[in-house]
Image: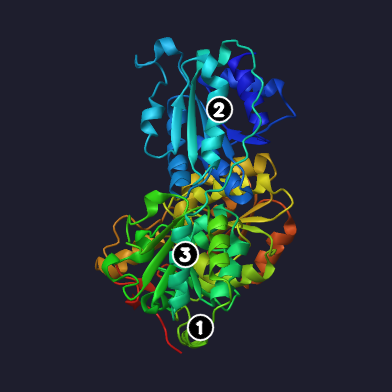
Amino acid sequence: MTGAEIIVECLVHEGVDTVFGYPGGQVIPLYDALYLSKGRIHHVLTAHEQGASHAADGYARSTGKVGVCIATSGPGATNLVTGLATAYMDSVPVVAITGNVPLSLLGRDSFQEVDIQGITLTITKHNYIVKKIEDLQDTIIEAFHIAREGRPGPVLIDIPKDMQVGEIDLKPFPEKEIEIPREPRAKDIEAAAELIRKAKKPMCYVGGGVIRSDSSAELRKFVDLIDAPVGSSLMGLGAIESSSPRFTGMIGMHGTRLSNLSISNCDLLIVVGARFSDRVISKSSTFAKKAKIIQIDVDPAEFNKNIMSEVHIISDIKTGLNALMKAIGEPLEHKEWMATIQEKRAKYPVKVASDAKRPKEILEALDRVFPADGFVTTEVGQHQMWAAQFLHSREPRHYLTSGGLGTMGFGTGAAIGAQVANPGKRVINIAGDGSFRMNANELATIARYKLPVIVLLMNNHVLGMVRQWQTLFYEKHYSETTLDTPLDWVKLAEAYGVKGMRILPEDDPEKVLKEAVEYGGPVVIEAIIPTDDMVYPMVAPGASIDDMIGYAET
């Protein structure tokens, strides 16, 4: 077989049914092999390679499988960089395959040649350049294993063109390894169990690791067993139902007053699959200063990186929680602590200023009409935080957002990936006008494949989050944050063959949103919102997380 044909066989062996990509000169042999293998792998042609990387990411987040994207050398490969960094920061399993110039032309500044292995060294879990065709098959199999195992992440394989056209025998595939979960050390489990038994005011802080490891059911049993409240990072939304009386909401800069106060007053903080992001902890010297800390994570590099902890449990989340529950044994009770949590829940609602109610109205209307099993993706900015605050948490893997890197333009590509992976479900991308401008060209992909993706465009005609900071901390110096281009988003959508709709300030948003959901095809809805709406509450930079501005008391 040619190397290109071997790549296809490896993808099929790894269970890949869909790839996202954009052809170019150095991947023509691979695209020819895909052409000859029609029916085995579905290829989705995006409008831009960055869209392909975000789509592979959305596919992976929504399914738990490895997402795959393909690009040619040079600018094709570099256009994947932002998507790979996004996946790396959020621990998403993606395999990116890039072509490169033949080995004889490497290092000679050849046409469309870049050292993509060097460029992506710090934003991939691992990367390769294949220089011997004998290594091609093993490299691809190993790449998928690395992307999946332990803490997931993106892997890049750079394959020069002569490795694709050369011929070699396909080797028998080894039996797939059964990935054995990492077992925690018994002494760590017992030390953690002892701290939990002694605690009077325990609290759980959970992150995306719970969702990545499919451990939501175990988490729910665990918090019931120890009778504790639970707050989440942005990436942890969906790990526990937002309707649960134990759920205190998001933690950190735009978290709830309830979560932040609970963190500051607990005497034991159990951190499960979360990494102490600066947007969560803010001022590290005051974070959870009354609490001892237990951290459960599959990646030991996260221990004592930003916050010191008393006990580290190095383990797969599911295995670690099950071991901890077994060690604790009988259910615990913290009636007084839980009663305090409920009192504060009633006292500190999420604030919506008198002139900033419209985003809440629109998102609550969406919550009423959008299917409960639908997928929500977001871009990055104020709309992202409003969605986190006002939408009820969905099932695990149903709320897809760029948490670590904060990538504007992520949501459109991720919505494509989620929709392709889940054709029977509804997908909506909640966007801001600033973010959507970055990847609006992917409307071409949505239209081409007739994907019933809805884009809810929250249009305040500014870069809202940056403007909010300019308002609060930079004396209203609105430097380059006003988006006053006379752009008609409805007409733009229609130009791509996508239905365009609009929600004006005087309109009932539920009526328009219901019509869009029932339409069943791709839709862009421009929702006009006030320019100076703020995301509240908020922790100012450098402040403790319990020192919030813009919160209300009842």
- In percent of width and height, residue 386 lies at 49, 67
- In percent of width and height, residue 302 lies at 38, 53
Distance between the Cα atoms at labels 1 and 3?
A: 20 Å
What residue would you read off at disc 3?
A: 190
Instruction: Specify the quadrant that holds the N terminus.
Output: top right
Mark 3 Cα shell of 10 Å, populated few (<14), some (14-19), many (≥20)? some
Residue 284: name its quadrant: bottom left
Residue 165: name its quadrant: top right
Give SS at disc 2: helix
Q: What residue type is labelled 2?
A: Ile
> In the image, is residue 482 above or below residue 159?
below
Q: Can residue 511 be seen in this view?
A: yes
Q: Which of marks 1 and 3 is nearer the N terminus?
A: 3
Q: Who is closer to the viewer here, 226 or 428?
A: 226
What residue would you read off at disc 1?
A: 334
Give SS at disc 3: helix
